[in-house]
Image: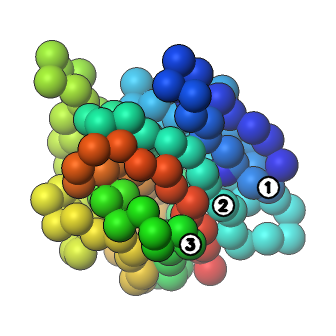
Amino acid sequence: MGCVGLKHLAAGAAALLVGTAAPAVANCERPAPIHFARGTASAELSGGLARGERDCFTISARGGQRMTVTQTNRGEDNVVLQIYRPSWKIVPSSEGPRFNGSALEGAEEGRDAHNWAGQLPTTGSYLLVIGTSRGGGEYLMRVEVR
């Protein structure tokens, strides 16, 4: 999540895309696209979140492909994720970003999903939102699309 993107420098946290080319930040104003390195089907995402913050990433995939998002640092059980199918929209608000669109079953907001796996229903850009259920936290996730 080999390209480094810095996130929340004031808080001392960093987001990293392994094997990808990504913008310098992964916030939800400009979600960072995940690009798999040539010959690979996965990438690792890592970063830190202060309370109430979220990181957003986009994943381009085809309908029928299988995607797996797995947390590899399970010690951080307060890190949760949501995944929105194409055509999602991020709407800024005074309380933080709001996500319009349809989430994938099992990865809806409020579900507090730590991992997700399934067949993708349609072709397009999916939105992966990483947040916390309480306080802050660090994440290390593996995203695989086959």
Residue 140, percent across and down? 57, 60
The residue pinned by badge 1 equals: 19
Asked which secondary structure carries label 1, the reply is loop
Q: In which quarter of the image is residue 6?
A: top right
Asked which secondary structure carries label 2, the reply is strand
Residue, x 34% and y 48% (percent of image)?
Answer: 131
Left or right of residue 129: residue 26: right
**Residues marked 3 and 2 touching at CB (< 8 Å):** yes
Left or right of residue 123: residue 135: left
Residue in front for this viewpoint, 141 or 89: 141
The residue pinned by badge 3 equals: 72
Q: Is residue 82 above or below residue 104?
A: above
Q: Quadrant of residue 100?
A: top left
Q: Is residue 86 visible?
A: no
**Residues marked 1 and 2 touching at CB (< 8 Å):** yes
Residue in front for this viewpoint, 32 or 94: 94
Numbered disc in front, either 3 or 2 = 3
For mark 3, does the 10 Å Cα neighbourhood hold few (<14), some (14 to 19), or many (20 or more) residues? Answer: some
Residue, x 28% and y 44% (percent of image)?
Answer: 135
Q: Which amino acid does label 3 sit on?
A: Thr
Q: Quadrant of residue 121?
A: bottom left
The residue pinned by badge 2 equals: 44
Q: In this view, does 77 lie above or below 56?
A: below
Residue, x 40% and y 83% (percent of image)?
Answer: 118
Q: What residue type is labelled 2?
A: Glu
Residue 117, percent across and down? 42, 81
Residue in front for this viewpoint, 83 or 76: 76
Mark 1 or mark 3: which comes first in sequence? 1
Residue 49, percent across and down? 43, 39
